[in-house]
Amino acid sequence: MRNRGFTLIELVVVMAILAILMVVSTANYRPEEIESSAFYHEVYSSIRYAQKLAITSGAHVRVTLTPNQYTLEHCDPVTHWQAGVDDCTMAANFVNVSNPGQAGNIGGTFASNVMTVGAGIVFTFNPNGLLPFSPGNTVTTIPFSLTGGSSPSIQIIHETGFTSAL
């Protein structure tokens, strides 16, 4: 006689294994870690966007990072050219970058329990997409502290403008 189907014991064992897998996978799901990682990547993408905007528009683009938010601002050197000098060194000449395709400006705020960034980090991409550098300062590293204990960073090389997420 042929056996067709599964025995009750086999079905119970399979159900027990599935229950154990569900408990283990649910225990590792932490929305705060996912949110902090997503926001870190959003900040990284915005920094890359700022650099590209500086190149394509010929404007200076400033990125400001505080412990719980970031903003992008730009200064068009054509409209802020005074006495043959680029006047985009003055903070008052920068305005927020509009978010293309959406209402509002580019920038974001995040809960301090999700992610923190070093206080008062400000840098400006010139119209070539580069950061100003001096012989002793050729790399800008932006440290992050994410929920779950990871500490990634974003690094910008001044001479080339190369931006990488570490």
Image (cartoon, rainbow, N blue to C red):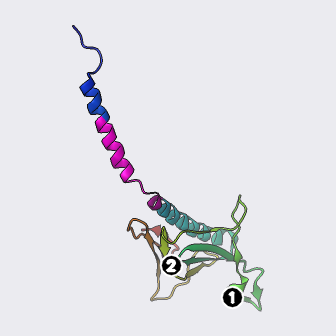
Q: Amino acid at mark 1?
A: Met
155 to the left or right of 130: left
Q: Is residue 147 above or below residue 26?
A: below
User: Furthest residue to the top?
Assistant: 1
Which residue is rendered at x = 59% and y = 78% of the image? 64
Instruction: Report the residue at 24% width, 26% height from top.
Output: 9
Instruction: Name the residue tied to disc 2.
Output: 159
State the extent of the magenta-drawn residues as a range.
16-34
Residue 133's x, y, as percent? 52, 85
Report the label total. 2
Q: Secondary structure at mark 2?
A: loop
Image coordinates for residue 58, horizontal then vertical, percent = 68, 74
Foreground residue among 69 and 128 = 69
Task: Determine the CA span between mark 1 and mark 2.
Answer: 23 Å
Mark 2, other Cα within 10 Å: few <14 / some 14–19 / many ≥20: some
* Image quarter in which the N terminus is found: top left
N-terminal-most mark, 1 or 2: 1
Numbered circle sitting on residue 98: none
Residue at the limit of the structure toward the bottom, as seen here: 83
**Placement of 6 over or under 46, stated as above or below:** above
Residue 65 appears in which quarter of the rendering? Answer: bottom right
Residue at image x 29%, y 36%?
A: 16
- Residue position for label 1: 90
Q: Amino acid at mark 2?
A: Glu
On the image, the x and y values in percent for residue 4 come to 28, 14
Nearest the eye: 32 or 44: 32
Is the stretch drawn in magenta largely helix, strand or loop?
A: helix
31 vs 79: above or below: above
